[in-house]
Amino acid sequence: MRSVDLNADLGEGYGPWRMGDDEAMLGIVASANIACGGHAGDPETMFRTLSLACQRGITVGAHPSYPDKENFGRRRLLCEPAEIERFLAAQVGALAAVSTLAGARVKYVKPHGALGNLATVDRPVCEAIVRSVKVVDPGLAMLAISGTLLEHVARDAGMVVFSEVFADRGYTSKGNLVPRGQSGAMIVDPFEATDRMMRFLNSGRMPTADGDEVELKVDSICIHGDSAHAIEMARHLRSALDRGGFTVSPFIAPA
Amino acid sequence: MRSVDLNADLGEGYGPWRMGDDEAMLGIVASANIACGGHAGDPETMFRTLSLACQRGITVGAHPSYPDKENFGRRRLLCEPAEIERFLAAQVGALAAVSTLAGARVKYVKPHGALGNLATVDRPVCEAIVRSVKVVDPGLAMLAISGTLLEHVARDAGMVVFSEVFADRGYTSKGNLVPRGQSGAMIVDPFEATDRMMRFLNSGRMPTADGDEVELKVDSICIHGDSAHAIEMARHLRSALDRGGFTVSPFIAPA
Amino acid sequence: MRSVDLNADLGEGYGPWRMGDDEAMLGIVASANIACGGHAGDPETMFRTLSLACQRGITVGAHPSYPDKENFGRRRLLCEPAEIERFLAAQVGALAAVSTLAGARVKYVKPHGALGNLATVDRPVCEAIVRSVKVVDPGLAMLAISGTLLEHVARDAGMVVFSEVFADRGYTSKGNLVPRGQSGAMIVDPFEATDRMMRFLNSGRMPTADGDEVELKVDSICIHGDSAHAIEMARHLRSALDRGGFTVSPFIAPA
Amino acid sequence: MRSVDLNADLGEGYGPWRMGDDEAMLGIVASANIACGGHAGDPETMFRTLSLACQRGITVGAHPSYPDKENFGRRRLLCEPAEIERFLAAQVGALAAVSTLAGARVKYVKPHGALGNLATVDRPVCEAIVRSVKVVDPGLAMLAISGTLLEHVARDAGMVVFSEVFADRGYTSKGNLVPRGQSGAMIVDPFEATDRMMRFLNSGRMPTADGDEVELKVDSICIHGDSAHAIEMARHLRSALDRGGFTVSPFIAPA
């Protein structure tokens, strides 16, 4: 049996608001990236999500971001790497403390949104992310987008690094994500997305938007929880993995 | 030589704003209570204050609060102890992470403002504070108002506890602070405040607002930094301690 | 044909988050209470909701609140009436300006949540609300809970006042709402709620939780949008009104 | 007697924090630009500042900004002109409502910081600013940096426009401000700044950083309140104007 992880962004509510169906998603994934108060999340939301994940034996990671709830961390903020380092440390430190209250333990970090995108190519930002993680817990792993600069910078800094691919995003023949807004950026059909993932997992080669293939390393598949058909796509993929001879298990144990 | 600590609330700015003169105060005190983003503070302000304190060899503690910048944590917020536990853990965890970036190490916790007042008498709140601190670092000490419930609850929970008295606040014959707004609550004259502190330190008995005395334990004297003559009073007291045979040293080493 | 208004709280999202199904509700109600950035809402959310309401010819009112998004304005904040007056004026003034951008015009004000509850009994708070509304536009009407102090204070101050009853809340024999958490506070069954409303509209006497009836004035029926079966209950009631000989029309024209 | 206005940015505190010495500045200037909750300000701070200005007969204007207190509105935020239009309308609408509570009346608008800089050159942003102002009150005037695009766009839209120059900023020979950080950007010596202003007022030609002169229109001189020697420079300039045959009076009456 080969094994692969499924991860999703959870705990992305704020105060009275919810984003997606966390409970359903926790029945499907093996790892949960939890918002830390940057693009979403507050102590109550963090605690509730961490407690649910812990009860189900799901591995939890921190999902820090630009501090920008109104834009959900999707807009780049102009700031120095040193500032990024400080607000990320504060976010991950906050989540780690609340996770202990919830009986969970944060095991990895995955940067969110516009910051995560910048970390695919910007070395000073990657280095700031790595430093901010290490001050909270030098044993934390990094979950990075497969084939991007963050993988290399984190690995060179001695971190354990895991690589993720996206179930619902198109790839270029260079192994990059097709930018949102361009044709082929999003794969909305659950059958198509599942089909592509199974082909990729069985071959190690990701079908690209231009009809080619590209080799990508994979430890985890990211499924988005806030799009319209998120749960449907997640269930579809999970079921195909179960039937296709894959064990869905976390890339790192929950505790 | 007898020794005593002087502590002050620092890092109480936010974004572009400052509160008091942190640099001057860091030349006077031995321990600094650093705001954690609750009543004041943000990652940049935390980092700057922690770095300054670290450079001067000052011991740093966390100064968490109700999350209420607009009221500077001085207003009680209606919430459950479990909520207090979660937002305090998030605040102290954030400060601890940023302190490592700054080369400092948080050694104790002192609750701020309305929450600190509530912790003099409310057992569930004291217990929430203790739990929130332990999840960040079980080795953290508590700095509590001398003679109050928080001292006992923290000690019963196995924490190392230090006791503070206030240089600029009047005391009742029961050893409580005269409530703000009542006659005798504030001591604004630096000579009077210093005189009272020196008498107290030499006798162990605090002169009270009604002309009596009350026995109080003391490890640290709190001097406020945001009142008009704060720095003047602090310098006056510090000078009297130096001349009066006291060493001003922190109740716990900075690292 | 007798006529009655249906109102609902809309625009209660924030940044990327939504609360309830505003588009569905705008197909059912005749008046929309729009969040002003206190318990919910931001300029983008206000504009989007106001534009939708305007397109459908729905009358819009301001729905200001304690400034407390994390608790959705449902928690009482300790503050002076003069402070309430100032933050309410800022909220209503903000919504009024954005409404002009959206081609809509704010016609009335209805206080939200814990502030709305306080305004049923607290005269200084009622007076603060009235003053805050008048500085934005002396022609604004007040939508108040039927039979409460706010009705009288607003009317005595020369405002046009409309009275609302709740489709999904139980009443005491004194005409007050059964407090949340008590038995009979919430009516969750759409049939029961609709049945009660129709009996009330035809008789002017509201069936109470203890089996009695109480006379209540009514210009509008409030239907909540954020409960689980909100849209179902709203449709059910709307359909019963249409079939029962009532015209659903706003208590005040949209422009 | 020739007359000229002096304006300063006031009410730039937030919650417990203050920026500069508003009371001293209100004794010097004739017009006060009041923060609206974007880069600074909250209903209490707005009210207090507006009340002080009103008592002294000072004309008040709105000083809206990018919504970014942590960076004091000094950082450009990536957003569409339509978003700018909405948050500016909300800010100016809020201030206008609070000003009525304070007995004052907002008479003009001056955009702050990074937004103000963008409005010197960016037409869609200028148009967004103009639209946002007009929905609050079509009679509001615009206070724009002399010689910049905002002047023209506002005038073309039918607004009354006043032009300001800066007492403490260097000018290029094209009439633009020397960018902060470049040599000659800031004039810190009160004698030099005053001397330059008097020469300019008497000749209509502004001495430039490269030793040349440039013609500039002027209705008002902006003096900054948050720099170290702000009050000293303001008093110096005010005194020179009084002695030099100028009446300091607002470009528009306060009520």
Image (spheres, coloured by chain):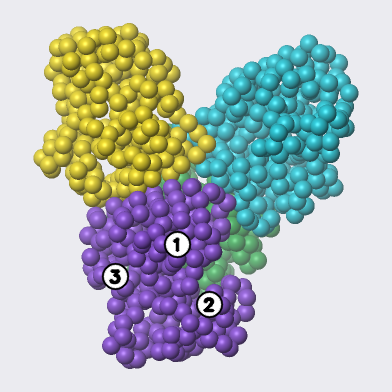
Chain colours: A yellow, B purple, C cyan, D green
Please state the chain letter of the residue tagged with numbered disc 1 in the rendered image: B
B136, C77: nearer the viewer? B136
At label 1, counting other C-alpha atoms closer than 10 Å, the crowd grade (few under 14, some 14-19, many 20 or more) is many
In the depicted structure, whether residue D201 falls above or below residue C81: below
Question: Which label number is shown at residue B175?
Answer: 2
The residue pinned by badge 3 equals B252
> Whole-Å distance between the Cαs marked 3 and 2?
25 Å
Q: Which mark is residue A154?
A: none
* Mark 2–mark 1 distance (CA, rounded to whole Å): 18 Å
Q: Secondary structure at mark 1?
A: helix
Q: Secondary structure at mark 3?
A: loop
- For this orientation, the residue located farthest to the front is B156
Residue B33: image location, x then y, percent: 37, 66
Please report, as a chain letter, where disc 2 is located.
B
Residue A35 in the image, given as x and y percentages of width and height? 37, 37
- Residues at marks 3 and 1, common chain? yes
Which amino acid, by three-letter code, is at mark 2?
Gly
Q: Is residue D83 above or below residue D142?
A: above
- Callout 1 amino acid: Val
What SS does tag 2 mark?
loop
- Residue at the spot 72% in from the left edge and 51% down from the top edge: C125
